[in-house]
Image (cartoon, rainbow, N blue to C red):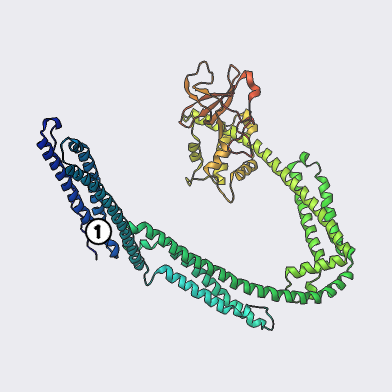
Amino acid sequence: MTQVTAPTPHAPTRFHPCRPVMALSQEEKHERASRSLEELEEVIETFRKRSQEFQELKKVREKPGMAASEVKRLESGVEDFQETFKQFGLDVKDYISKHAPHFAALGLSLDLRRSWLDAVNKSGEQRKEAGEALEAVRAACRNAKETAKKELLRAAKVRLHLEEDPGEMAVSKARELVEMCEDKVEPFIGIPQNKDENEMDWIAKELEPMIAEAEEGIQAAFTQTQEHPLKMEVEIEEEIREEINEYLKDEAKRLQMALGQFGRRTGRVKNLVANYQRDVQKAKSKELLDELKPQILEAVKALNVEEASAEVSEAIKEAEVLSEKVRSMALMPAEELQAIAKEMDAKVAEAASSLEAFQDQLCPIEEHTVEEVDDYVKQVLRKHIFSEMKGFQAKLDFFQVRLKRLRGILERCAQQIKSQDVFRLKKVRTKVLAMMDVFREDQADKGLEGLPSKDVFRMLDKDEDGVLNREEFLGFFEDVFPLLQDKYQQLQPSTEELESLFEFGLKNDETSLSFDGFERLLIRFMQVVQTTTMTKNVAITAGEVIRSLKPGELLEVLGGPQTNSAQLRRVFCRAKDGAIGWVTVTSNAARSAKRPTRNTAPSLGVTGADGWSWMVGVR
């Protein structure tokens, strides 16, 4: 291995100061000029030796295989000489500028002046040669560094290519499985003529698990190739870590590209089998169609169409009679509409079933075949029959149009029933909210004014399981019923109404009411739309201001609305920070400004006991 020694650093050149020219004799002028020339020549000679010593480093270009540590020493030598080269140029320039006037003095010999000029020129030549040597050694240093780095990369790549690399092994396994499938599928290549169908079916069955295993192997190999080999205990030098990372990415990409090809080859195997089976089935279908077409067409021609379609026609007529009864569905009682819609739905289902049976009669495939016939054959046979018996298609289309109209009427009935249910539940919820106000008043008399909704929920949740079952929900209102005064007795909902409201609050397959569902049904919320204040009393003038309310705040309604002496509608509310007090929802001068809005139960659209949702702060 080449050993490189950095040259000794060059110390800045030191020159002797000179005395004023006018104070010297002719002899002293000559002596001083000679001394200046000697000093310059000494500096140039010293730099020349340093330059020659440095130029020895150029030999590294002829000795490849330099170690990384030696490259670093070479770089250090280049940096040192770079500083020496720079300092030499500055020192010589400064020295010449200061001592050149000495050689302009009268009486100096021509030889001395020529020697000075020669020394100045020589310093320039030395600096030029040193600059060329510096560039040459710097280039050699770069080449050596690149060579050393390549060697490090080569050695690292060798270390990374383990004999039992998981990624390579997984790819090889996947390749082996794919090749086994390709060998097995060879009989399916080409036109499947003169091939035993049973034998081919057996090969296809054997291929199924083989293809599945190959696909699993490909997927497993993908996973292995995505794992970074540097996670293993392989030491990589810091200066080549970035290049090694890129190399590993390229290697992983190469393996993944191969796995992509394996996937396409596996797909080709499946396509060969599928194409063969499709061609076999197509040939069978053609043979079957040639056999069935005349038989079925003859049977259909002998069919009494009017008699066969009588059952369909009768069922559709009965459903149409019922549809006439729901023309004014918007004015019908909910119970009557539901009963007629239910009966009509049964008749439409009966008509659809009869129509399907009639279609089977027009294409009696099962009567002429022993085995199951695929849909393609049925479609071709029906198309053939309808092309020969054109009146059949027109009759089927007529029945289908009538059934479509009846289904549309049923959909409108369902929408109307849903709308009536929502309206009915809206009235039930209005009663329930009024009962909640009575409950809150009773709790306030017991010193529990302004109970948060979470506390009310816990009071209802007797078994403390975090949800309200049907018995807990109904039991709560049974406890509240005795609190209703005579004037509120008409607000008492029936058990059936409460059960329907409970069902409405459930989601999906729930059997118990969550806290969110409880809030949607039994708690009112209002949103502040304009800056206003919350006061302690109903009367604004006599009420202490608790705090201001900002637009966007959500308030839980605890009671009201009530109308105070100033004819302002006021509600008792709780803010999120726990503040409790009265707020104005509208004013006497702007009653028309009341705006219904949706609360957490949008399908009911009710947040107030009077059927309106009031926006807090509207003036």
Q: Which residue is mark 1?
A: 57
- Taking 380 as reference, is 275 left or right? left
The crowding category of the residue bearing disc 1, from other C-alpha atoms within 10 Å (few below 14, some 14 to 19, many at least 20), is: many
Residue 561 at x, y percent in the picture: 58, 26
- Residue 51 higher or lower than 386, as above or below: above
- Residue 366 higher or lower than 570, as above or below: below
Q: Amino acid at mark 1?
A: Leu
Quadrant of the image containing the N terminus: bottom left
Quadrant of the image containing the C terminus: top right
Residue 30 at x, y percent in the picture: 12, 39
Residue 350 at x, y percent in the picture: 78, 58
- Residue 561 higher or lower than 277, as above or below: above
Whether residue 222 is visible: no
**In terms of secondary structure, where does tag 1 sit?**
helix
State the residue in front, 273 or 199. 273
State the residue in front, 4 or 374. 4
Query: Where is residue 142, by image quadrant?
Result: bottom left
Q: Residue at x 48, y 37 (%)?
A: 455
Residue 259 at x, y percent in the picture: 50, 67
- Residue 106 higher or lower than 340, as above or below: above
- Taking 19 as reference, is 214 left or right? right
Q: Residue at x 88, y 63 (%)?
A: 390
State the residue in front, 448 or 122. 122
Whether residue 438 is visible: yes
Query: Where is residue 100, by image quadrant?
Result: top left
